[in-house]
Amino acid sequence: MSAIDNLPPLREVIQTHELAARKSLGQNFLLDLNLTAKIARQAGDMADCDVLEIGPGPGGLTRGLLSEGARHVLAIEKDRRCLPALAEIADHYPGRLTVIEGDALKIDPLAHLTPPIRVAANLPYNVGTELLVRWLTPPEWPPFWQSLTLMFQREVAERIVATPGSKAYGRLAVLAQWRSDARIVLQLPPGAFTPPPKVSSSVVHLTALPEPRFPADPEVLSRVVAMAFNQRRKMLRSALKGAAPDIEDRLNAAGLSPTDRAEQIPLEGFCALAREIAKG
Ligand code: SAM
């Protein structure tokens, strides 16, 4: 019997359902249910929330979320081999787990969710970063989610929480910190996963702020930041040449020096510049 529910241990689930991990799907499973419950707790109080879980796999984190009291979990999984294992969990927690088979990059889950909504996932890193950027850049704020609790390789997690002046500071930090609080809440060694990946991982917890820290148009900010960091070693006046014909004037008006580099500019500076550029 496992520690958090009386479903079979995950190793047994994997054997029964022949869920040998597939590299093509980025499958590195968490089999320790105490650990998955600990990750689930980082999501905060879930008793009155629907939780969107992407990539449940054999269901370790799903079981953590349910045993920690999530009102309802909507799980989207691409690998149909995992569905019977997930159906067993759904039977064990009647009415509290819905599973959709498909690609999370192509499915709009909102029709199946009732606010307030939290998101939790241990995803392949490329899919995770793409979804994170989407979740951070909706045209309207606040977004559909209250919090995101996501596993990343440590280097990506450090980019999300990075501060100006560090090598890790870039587009992800600006987008994440503009409209949310982002913290690394857990560090996991490769051995926490089966099979172990090559690098260490971190769980990042992001809480949506009610309003952006500084006003800016999301689309303009996103574009300016992408341009600035695409050529991060160049001075802003050349990295941002394409952003506006009179970029030096715009930089000055935003209180920035045309000879600064993107790495040195705090969030407030990028927002001021986005406002200047949006003036047209
Ligand atoms: N959450 C499980 C755990 O912690 O043990 C599995 C984690 S494993 C790193 C990633 C999971 O995401 C796999 O089950 C994989 O099949 C699934 N996955 C990969 N790409 C996906 C996609 N585009 N949409 C939905 N699920 C995906």
Image: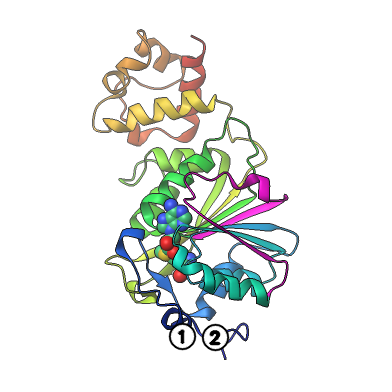
Secondary structure type for disc 1: helix
Q: Choose between 229 and 20: the one closer to the eye.
A: 20
**Residue marked by disc 2:** 8
Secondary structure type for disc 2: loop
Structural crowding at the residue carrying mark 2, measured as other residues with C-alpha within 10 Å and reported as few (<14), some (14–19) or many (≥20): some
Most distant residue in the bottom direction: 1
Name the quadrant where ligand 1 sits: bottom left
Quadrant of the frame with the N terminus: bottom right
Q: CB of mark 1 within 8 Å of CB of mark 2?
A: yes
Residue 52 within the magenta-colored segment of the rendering: no
Q: Is mark 2 within 8 Å of ligand 1?
A: no
Q: Residue at x 37, y 43 (%)?
A: 169
Residue range (magenta): 93-121
Image coords of residue 154 (percent x, y):
36, 59
Structural crowding at the residue carrying mark 1, measured as other residues with C-alpha within 10 Å and reported as few (<14), some (14–19) or many (≥20): few
**Residue marked by disc 1:** 12
